[in-house]
Amino acid sequence: MKLILSTILSLCMISPGFAAPSLEEMALIPAGKSQMGSRKSLLELKPHDLFNTDRHTLGPENPAHEVSLDAFYIDIYEVTNVKYKKYVKDTGAKEPQGWGNPNFNGDQQPVVGVSWKEAVAYCKWSGKRLPTEAEWEKAGRGKRPIQYPWGDSPPDSEKLNYNEEKMKTMPVGSYEKGKSDYGIYDLSGNASEWVHDWHYPEYYLFSPKANPQGPESGQYKIIRGGNWRNTSEYVDLTYRNATTPRMRNTGVGFRCAKNAS
């Protein structure tokens, strides 16, 4: 243990821009099997969307399948503006798009308007990484094949920020009734979240059963979870959206993850 702590401290001294990894405000997701995806018909796949570069490509969420994941940690809250401000100050990184709008720049609101690469860079600076699509979904569903973090009851304004009711993001952790079994907040609503994986619509048909990482390459990156703009059909835990990695808008933020071993 002393050797591990010494190594971390040495890294911090060598690299002033490196933030020592911390398990503060992270939840441990145990190793094991869980269901991923939904049981929608394969007929819902629209192959022509693969060639339509003028819109976000939406992939199917089927077929439902079992995955086995190693234990990992994931942030209980979406990364906030106040945390991202420290990163910008320490590294000189570009400011997020959301900071120019008072509806999105509060210290405890989730940082929004960052690209996928910027999210990756922040997580790396924090000693973490982006969660995979499979990890993100397990963090929300736990061991139950539920539709929302809280269960299967329909969304409402006590559980999440959605449907343009507030017309802005809310401070992270505002919706106690909307947290998952693992105590993780805002997996539905508030801000959609970048994950690690490249997007491929048919990936669920041939993805590995153990620790899937997504395709090796692609044109779009996966976004998970609904945001403050979305209606109820886009805030469930299996919904998959995808867009170009360079996209920045006020509907998308992120949270980080970390290996448990």
Image: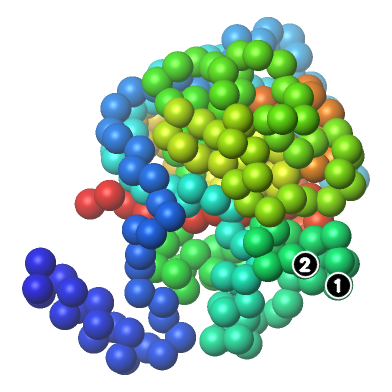
Please indicate, yes or no, whether residue 246 appears anywhere in the rendered image.
Answer: no
Query: How many discs mark residues in the rendered view?
Result: 2
Please indicate, yes or no, whether residue 63 appears anywhere in the rendered image.
Answer: yes
Amino acid carrying label 2: it is: Asn
Q: Is residue 251 left or right of residue 22?
A: right
Name the N-terminal-most of marks 1 and 2: 1
Q: Position of residue 167 (x, y in %)?
A: 89, 47
Q: Position of residue 69 (x, y in %)?
A: 34, 34
Q: Are marks 1 and 2 in contact (CB under 8 Å)?
A: yes
The residue located at (88%, 38%) in the rendering is 165
Indicate the colouring scheme: rainbow
- Vertical placement of residue 248 versus 77, above or below: below
Q: Is residue 218 left or right of residue 13?
A: right
User: Residue 105 bears which disc, if any?
Assistant: 2
The residue located at (81%, 56%) in the rendering is 250
> Residue 4: which quarter of the image?
bottom left
Q: Position of residue 156 (x, y in %)?
A: 76, 24
Q: Position of residue 221 (x, y in %)?
A: 65, 48
- Vertical placement of residue 132 versus 154, above or below: below
Give the residue number, with chain letter if any, for mark 1. 100
- Vertical placement of residue 121 versus 136, above or below: below
User: Residue 191 bears which disc, if any?
Assistant: none
